[in-house]
Image (cartoon, coloured by chain):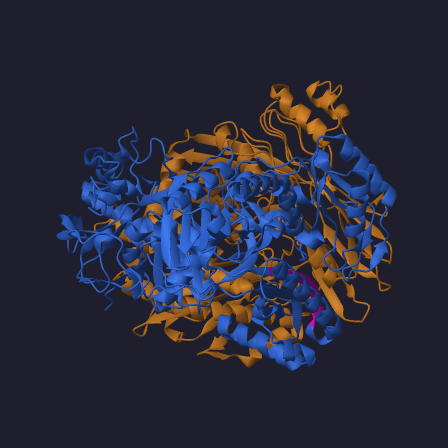
Chain colours: A orange, B blue
Amino acid sequence: MNSVKFSALKVGLTWQRLDSLMDETAYTFVRTSFSSVVRDNWDLAVSLMDSRGRQFAQSSRSVPSFIGTMPSTLAVMLQRYPTSELKSGDILISNDGYHGTGHLNDITMARPIFKDGQVIAFIGSVFHSVDIGGAPSVNARDSYEEGLTIPVAKIVREDVENEDVIAFLTENLRAPEETLGDIRAQFAAYDMAIPRLLKILEDEQIEDLDEMVDEILNRSEKAMRQAIEAVENGSYYGEIQLDGFDEPLKICCEVSISGSELTIDYTGTSPQIDKPINSVMNYTRAYSAYAIKSAFDASTPNNDGSFRPITIKAPEGCLVNPKRPAPIWARHLTGHYLPPVIFSALANIMPEQVIADCGSPIWNVYFAGKQPDGQRFMKMFFMNGGHGARPHQDGPACLSFPSNITTLPIEQFENSVPLLVTEKSLIPDSGGAGQYRGGPAQRVSFKATADNPVTMTIRHERVIFPPRGLLGGKAGAAGTDYLNGDRIPAKVRLDIQRDDVVTFDTPGGGGFGPPVDRDADKIRSDVESGLVTAASAKRDYDFDAGEAKSDG
Amino acid sequence: MILTPVKRNLMDKPYRIGVDIGGTFTDIVMLDTRSGRLYNEKVLTTPDDPSAGVLTGVASILKANDATAHAVNQIIHGTTLVANAIIERRGAKVALVTTKGFRDILEIGTEGRYDSYDLFIDMPEPLVPRRWRFDVPERLSPEGHVLTPLDENAVVAVAKEIAKSDVTAVAISLLHSFQNPSHEQRVLEIFQQEAPGLAVCISSDVMPEIGEYERASTTVCNAYVLALFKSYLERLTAGLRDSGFEKDLFLMLSDGGTVHEETAAAYPIRLVQSGPAGGVQATSVIGALAGESNIFCFDMGGTTAKASLIENGEPMRSTEFEVARVYRAKKGSGLPLRVPVIEMIEIGAGGGSIATINKLGLVQVGPESSSAYPGPACYAQGGTDATVTDADLILGYLGADSFLGGDMSLDVDAATKALELNIAEPLGISAVDAAWAIHETVNESMAQAASIHALEKAQRISDYAMIPIGGAGPVHACNIGLKLSVPRVICPSSAGVASALGFLVSPLAFTFVQGGLVSLDAADFESIRTMLSRMEEKGKELLSSAGTAQDDFKVELLVSMRYLGQGYNVEAPVGSEILAADDRTSVRGVFEKAYMFQYGRIEPDVPVEIVSWRVVVSGPAPVIDLSGARPTASDSEARKGEREVYFGPAKGFVKTPIFDRYCLTPGESFGGPSIFEERESTTVVPPGANSKIDDALNLVVELPHD
């Protein structure tokens, strides 16, 4: 194979141990975390980088936003504090959205790992803090309005917390206990991980970690190159419409395959806007890399090597590569469109490896206000849409893609806020028709129960342009937002009063393949379940439901 | 194996019998309480009606000992029936009744992908299709206050519709019902009136814990297997009665407690992990007899392995479980359950796991596994894949002529060919190196998983003694033990029937769990005490009716707590005197002690909240003692011969003596390397490890660590 330094057996065993160490570290963090965004949504990642900053192991359960971002953030951190100025027990922190993962809410930290007085690696992690101060809103015109920027700083110096940094956070955040609780949970996770990494190196008799990293990255690179080589050379184009704000926006995407190299070029995409949906280059890279990894090489572990054959290009100043200080808070409203636009570009050349559009960018709602006892609260609730249909399978109902963010148990949610969830159910006819049907979407309704008004913030997409079907499949249903039964804008902040009901119909998944090819038994079963009404069965499939019972 | 007599034996009914139904075999273990002697029997499992196999097995073991069913005092039974019925979807046609607006919670689930990158994953199909999921107007607040009264007319209409259909079981799971069961109880009454004859389960009875999806899923699973399990029990008890058995039947629960048949019939979902729980209970006793109370139990079979930890003689427990995973052993791909279980991790690799070269050019073992037929290449039934068993054969761990006591000979040429074709040639290495790579890779997976599990429990695996059970366990145990720095591996002589043995040593016990989210400062201790004493009384009733004397009861109170804002709980035992005194500081104290132990830090300024209470009411554990054990086999020569066995590139092949496990007597000791063969398994002891037969006939291996 690539190297004679290590046997395949040794590489395999070491790699397995490193990946499992990262999962263990993430798990320790999650178990002791204070925020539901970490605990329930796993909005975090933990990774190991070698002395040169190359990421060679990452926790397997992470939202895609964090793929490959830590090496770029670490490089910026090391410009401020070169390795030579780092001491054992130092921890660096920053949340600069343009150097990190694309918005201020994600805080990245890194700690050098010393062996015999030398930095041999870094352990890093990134997590989402629900509040980061400021006034992030759909109307933010620049990133300064969106909250506190923590410049690269040492939050811990030689095992002692830096009180100045802690004070900045405490004074600027609305819920500092939660965020600091999560930060300290990561300190504990690092403490657990570092001796274990050193033990692995000792057990496996690895003198020079960088050499093992070379081996790991080379193997990952080779696997990705083989997968790319299997696809015919050429340039493939796709584009997608975004609802946007005052006018629709467009993402253009050309995927070029040449031998074992793959290039994605977003030239032609709409310019950046002064609304907070711009996707900084790191975020654009992360979601593009995620799409390519899932379509080409889903089963191998995640590290820098897989992405060496991939080049992502985007003109500076466009929606997917904005210039500072464009607002970036809700960058997922752009970034979550990248997998579907890439898949639609590739659909004709590799139809077996892609899926139809899902009901994403993910929908969520922020509620903020006062509890009956006067205590302030701020709570986010995620609601996934239907999943896109696949080449040989229907789309599952409300399965998260691409962000893999889970929902909160209603019984837990209602315990923490003065709101009741009055409905959470599947919406009939919301999955796009096709040989394989798109996943149905869900309706979620909330009713305010306290005398204090509750401020509700939403920023939803796929209300104008629904999730598209692929290769003859039809689009899923568009999403809709309601207040007391009347439609409201999809990007809005408003106060709701006691007994008001807000309702969100998430978007349904797109269908795959022509509806005329759908198996009659599947249509009948959909009508029986009520997920497809008899009228739609007639219209979309020319299927006469007859006796079949529809009770949707 | 021989046990010394228990204290209270009944001379006219001296026998106790444990029965475990596995996929292939039904194992029967019988204890003669007069002599302490144990007898084993294995009969083929009868999948169409598993009670037939049990009856045959019990009859056969009694006959072999010239005894009759009249002389049997107790039969304790564990079975995979419940889990298999769910996995194979053989349960009842179930309807679900939920709160208005929530009929789809069962299908929507957590909305999370169990694999982030796989675009083609499928989620488990709900046991209740949408057509049979109903919602009725009613609503409780998070505290359990009625916000919307139950619409009884709507319930009547649903009950009538269900009564007309071919649905036979109903699960009722309303929002926040764990805080106030009154609506669910009323729905139950209406169903009993309007649709008598249906099996109806309510979530506040089956598992009153927070989390609407998991609670509904648990209740549905219980309803799904209720009738099937009940009719199985009826057939079994009728059969046993006809054979002359006069006492009651007891069943092993997933948390290692045993209960009377009537209790088991009401909560069959509690038996979902019944068999494996018995195995862990057995290792706990085997360990105790060998002087070990901290045990790492390792059960490796054909397609999966299971690991669990026993601390201070008690298996670690949990209330989270997942059944019928659709993607091998992958967490998140199954139906979630909230039931008291002995905590085990499942690893998707076993003796039949297939080795391949993956895309990274590395050896990968599993997750694909060869089925029983054609099986590993060495079975010579036409299999061409290289499996863990093939590797074990080539390395000399398994004897070609001694597998299954010599009943099945293994084909070395076929195994070599499979290894060469699939692994050795692509990597440019020898067949032996390929076999070693497979063996090491699968052992590393096991070691990693066990180590992570221990860390999750804040334990160091190197502080534990390892007890391997299952067919492939003892073959791999010492190598895995070396990786984990485990000091000692104890290989019991009864590994093949460990679960059934475990049933005999488990106490009568029942666990109640009651959720009730409240901050510690605001908790109303008086109503908590009332609630706990109700649970305690109910437990005592169950045990009394099963014949346990009042003064033998043991009651444990455990409380799950967390810091306000957290979502994972830490469970700690809390004394009744602390509760009686409303001593909040001490309650916080027990929590922080447990939290500190697990995570190494506490948060003194953060408030604490109570999540749920667990009450365990148990009778005395049957006392057994193996000190009087004597060899069962003759004095024939233990050493059967020797063969070349491979122990890694540094040592290469080493001439290794082979011993017949059945001929070993207490006190005998052996240097490593050595191999011990028995019918169901083979124990591989590496160079440098010394082993000794203890008084209970365990083979105790001391592993060398530098």
A540 horizontally vs B252: left or right: right
Residue at coordinates 60% horizontally, 74% vertically from top-left? B574
Report if residue A529 is visible in the image: yes
Query: Could you tell me residue B292's position as x and y percent?
Result: 36, 68
Residue at coordinates 76% horizontally, 71% vertically from top-left? A375
The residue closer to the viewer here, A423 or B292, is B292
In the displayed image of the protein, which residue is found farthest to the front? Answer: B12
B261 horizontally vs A134: left or right: left
The residue closer to the viewer here, A276 or B644, is B644
The residue closer to the viewer here, B335 or B575, is B575
Q: Magenta-highlighted stretch: main secondary structure?
A: strand
| Image height of B620 relative to B129, above or below | below
Query: Could you tell me residue A317's position as x and y percent?
Result: 58, 50
Q: Which residues are magenta?
A: B511-519
- Name the quarter where the C terminus of chain B is drawn: bottom left
Which quadrant holds residue B285?
Answer: bottom left
Which quadrant holds residue A461?
Answer: top right
- Name the quarter where the N terminus of chain B is drawn: bottom left
Query: Could you tell me residue B679's position as x and y percent?
Result: 28, 45
Circle count = 0
